[in-house]
């Protein structure tokens, strides 16, 4: 089971995952600070790989431990604002999958401030809910009939770094998100065995 934590200081993690709005890669102050510390490595890699933040795009760069994240992943969120629950769940799920792929035990998910700004934007608590449900669903595996030994998940801790997310909103949002995802995963399991 993944444990969730509130991250407000860009704490150390094996993987930092940044949600990136399309066309706004270099406008994210937090990601800009990371890129500057890495001597322009992140933005140069993004240009080389033609990463612009389109929904579905993904880029992983090794930081060689020069910042708090051992690896930096960029995940495209698309252009449309405000960010909806579907894209938040996708970001959470993809963050977990990338973490598993690179053998990270701790993952921090960063959401740009623009994604939670504006009158139509989701509340910070709803953002935490969407990300948490995505992480939990991203870790779902239907393994009822597998005879192989079950492997323990690599990602143990997920930190959420969301603009204006209070502790109360964090806890309430993560609780809602994990309950919703666990119910959905249970329903998937029942549907697959015909129950």
Image (spheres, rainbow, N blue to C red):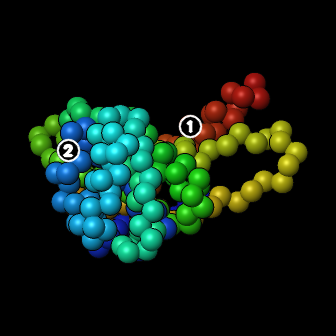
- Quick one: 95 or 35, which is closer to the camera? 35
Q: Label 1 neighbourhood size at 10 Å, few (<14), some (14-19), many (20+)?
A: some
Residue 47 seen in the current view: yes
Compared to residue 99, the image places residue 123 above or below, namely: above
Residue 175: horizontal and vertical position, in percent?
Answer: 44, 55
- Quick one: 44 or 168, which is closer to the camera? 44
Residue 88 seen in the current view: no
Label 1 or label 2, whichever comes before in sequence order:
2
Front tag of 1 and 2? 2
Compared to residue 158, the image places residue 78 above or below, namely: above
> Label 1's element?
helix
Identify the residue position indicated by label 1 in the image: 184
**Residue found at the very far left of the displayed protein:** 119
Spatial distance from mark 1 to mark 2, Cα to Cα? 33 Å
> Label 2's element?
loop
Residue 5: horizontal and vertical position, in percent?
Answer: 42, 67
- Quick one: 179 or 119, which is closer to the camera? 119
**Residue at x 62%, y 44% (from the top left corner):** 140
Asked if residue 78 lies left or right of residue 151, the reply is left
Compared to residue 84, the image places residue 176 above or below, namely: below
Residue 55: horizontal and vertical position, in percent?
Answer: 35, 34
**Residue at x 23%, y 32% (from the top left corner):** 80
Q: Quadrant of the C terminus?
A: top right
Query: Quarter-wise, where is residue 159 in the image?
Result: bottom left
Identify the residue position indicated by label 2 in the image: 24
**Residue at x 44%, y 53% (from the top left corner):** 60
């Amino acid at each position: 089971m993944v444990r969730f934590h509130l991250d407000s200081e860009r704490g150390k993690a094996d993987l930092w995952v940044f949600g990136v709005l399309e066309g706004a890669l270099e406008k994210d102050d937090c990601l800009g600070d990371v890129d500057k510390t890495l001597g322009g490595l992140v933005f140069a890699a993004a240009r080389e790989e033609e990463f612009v933040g389109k929904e579905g795009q993904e880029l992983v760069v090794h930081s060689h431990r020069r910042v708090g994240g051992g690896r930096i992943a960029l995940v495209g969120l698309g252009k449309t604002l405000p960010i909806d629950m579907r894209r938040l769940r996708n970001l959470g799920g993809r963050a977990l999958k990338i973490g598993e792929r690179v053998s990270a035990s701790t993952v921090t998910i960063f959401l740009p401030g623009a994604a939670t700004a504006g009158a139509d934007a989701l509340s910070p608590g709803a953002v935490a809910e969407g990300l948490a449900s995505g992480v939990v669903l991203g870790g779902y595996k239907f393994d009822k009939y597998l005879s192989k030994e079950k492997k323990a998940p690599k990602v143990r801790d997920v930190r959420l770094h969301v603009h204006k997310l209070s502790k109360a909103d964090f806890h309430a949002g993560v609780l809602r998100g994990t309950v919703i995802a666990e119910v959905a995963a249970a329903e998937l399991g029942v549907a697959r065995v015909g129950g």
